[in-house]
Amino acid sequence: MTSPSAELRDCTSPSVLTFIVAWGAITCCPLPATGATPAPSSAQVPQVQQSTAASQDDPDYNGEDFTRPQRSVETRLLFQTSSGATSQTERGSWLLRANWKVELDNGWRLGLLSQVPVVDKTTFAPTGTDQEFGIGDAALQAALIRDIDRHWAYGFGARLVAPTADDSLGSGKWQIMPGVGVRYSFLEIGPDTYFVPVVRYAISFAGDPSRRNISEPQIAPTLNIGLPNHWFVTFYPSNDIRINFGDPISGQTGRLFLPFDVAVGRKITDTWTISLEASVPIVNDYPVYDFKTEVRMNFAF
């Protein structure tokens, strides 16, 4: 009989391969030669329209700004481990995402997101190993966004999560996540260097009455720094800072989960962006995960 430790090593090896392939893709893909299109002068375009145009035309924009939605399709390969009082869980997810934007009147725009995950979950416990595979909880999001000036923008909206997952692959509850974000662009450094904190509040309702109730702020103080040659580094690209006001989970000793979360990526063509994210806990009183890595591949059109 194979021991849980041996199974753990077998399950972890694909994630190591994912790291190697993703990093090789980021560092080795050649950059195509592209011509720069002159931007209209400030005398030709009003300030807010100029800010929106800069968002559209920025050749290094990586799609991580909540206030600058884009038309794109995206796939994310997520792997994370977590530990309970008597068990350890490995969770691999393949996220299929579609993003859309609609320009509205008076400088407003609408950002739309849909997401469907495919989940592979393995739990190691003293009584044995349990593996599940299937569709996770699907999500839809809409946000209204407006530029204030060339530096500032803000947006607000909500995400709806449906309990479409089988068994324990999802939360078993409907969730609504109202959220708000504000962006400041450091244009003196470059158009792709910006700070955009985003806060959303996950609240569960309806669904399986036997599953835990969810009530938690999910925070992402995203800082993106544009680097030469189409590289970028992003701190806190995900809403992974959590404060649990809902039902406690196994191993919880407090309310706060605070990770160190960073991603490194590159815009490899005018339409393709790839990045590699890694995250580990700093404060793990509310244990969301022990380790997380995510490969993001985004195609904008």
Image: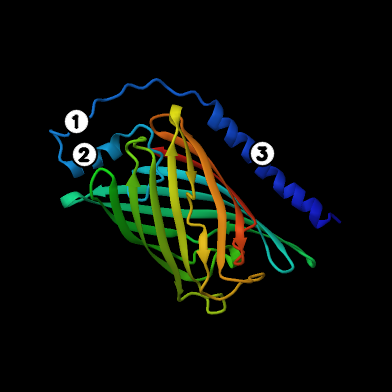
Can you say whether 54 is above or below 171 in the image? above
Q: Quadrant of the N terminus?
A: bottom right
Under circle 2, the secondary element is helix
* Badge nearest the viewer, 2 or 3: 2
> Can you name the residue that lies furthest to the right here?
1
Which residue type carries mark 3? Leu
Residue that badge 3 annotates: 17
- Disc with the residue nearer the chain's start (3 vs 1): 3
Which residue type carries mark 1? Pro
Which residue type carries mark 2? Gln
Q: Quadrant of the C terminus?
A: top left
> Can you name the residue that lies furthest to the left here?
43
- Disc with the residue nearer the chain's start (2 vs 3): 3
Q: Tell me whether circle 1 and circle 2 mark residues in contact (CB < 8 Å).
A: yes
Residue 40's disc is 1
Residue that badge 2 annotates: 50
Q: Residues within 10 Å of mark 3 (few under 14, many from 20)?
A: few
